[in-house]
Image (cartoon, coloured by chain):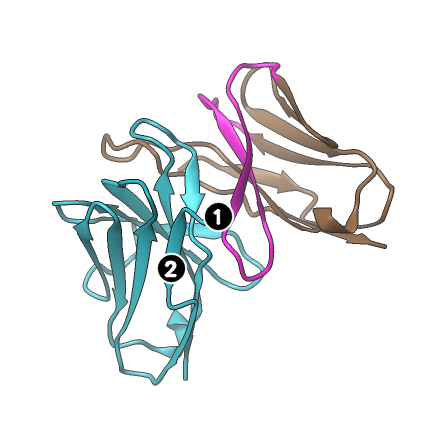
Amino acid sequence: TQLLEQSPQFLSIQEGENLTVYCNSSSVFSSLQWYRQEPGEGPVLLVTVVTGGEVKKLKRLTFQFGDARKDSSLHITAAQPGDTGLYLCAPPMNYGGSQGNLIFGKGTKLSVKP
Amino acid sequence: GAVVSQHPSWVICKSGTSVKIECRSLDFQATTMFWYRQFPKQSLMLMATSNEGSKATYEQGVEKDKFLINHASLTLSTLTVTSAHPEDSSFYICSAPRGPNSYEQYFGPGTRLTVT
């Protein structure tokens, strides 16, 4: 089983602040996905990063995949209350030859206060 | 709109009874679906892979006789929690790949199970 570490575990900030959350592993991943989950709902895909060193932007969110494809970061600029949620990183994990299932980190629970 | 639905969204049952949770893909076919369990303040843990036309594949530590999975059609997978106990109370979430060779998942909205 691949070990995924996400940090920080909890983050509470004021609206307008910037923040970065991290996803680290000792394993090399072919790709990595970031999801956001709001309370009582299923996760929603934000982005998939595939290439080492890749940077993807989604409005105020910037995702980076490490050069060695072992780690990733998510930076949010000028956070808003709507960004509140659990941010999960998830690389794919082949199982028994079938593709598609994911392994999830413990997530970073972000709270943005107005 | 939602592309994966779950029913019911929440359920309360008595200890010892069985509960069935449905996961449907809307407007697309899913030969594979995944079932996850999420305890409060924890992340998602993969329970099993549901395969249309064949037996489900269970993760280590998940009792296949307790968590029965049936992939009845290309758009429907069901998870039945048999002889439920309070420790089975959790948030159950299913997902389906976005495409035949895609790792990206559409997740259902989840089902909150409370066993009293």
For badge 2, the amino acid type reads Gln
What is the span of residues highlighted in magenta in the rendered image?
A25-54
Binning the other alpha carbons within 10 Å of mark 1 as few (below 14), some (14 to 19) or many (20 upward) gives few
Query: On the same chain: label 1 and label 2?
Result: yes
Q: Is residue A64 magenta?
A: no
Residue behind mark 1: B1
Binning the other alpha carbons within 10 Å of mark 2 as few (below 14), some (14 to 19) or many (20 upward) gives many
State the residue at coordinates (26%, 40%): B29
Q: Is residue B26 left or right of residue B10?
A: left
| Earlier sequence position, callout 1 versus callout 2 | 1
Q: Colour of chain A?
A: brown
Q: Is residue A101 above or below residue B72?
A: above
Residue behind mark 2: B6
Q: Is residue A49 above or below residue B43?
A: above
Q: Is residue A31 magenta?
A: yes
For badge 1, the amino acid type reads Gly
Q: Position of residue A78 (x, y in %)?
A: 83, 38
Q: Colour of chain B?
A: cyan
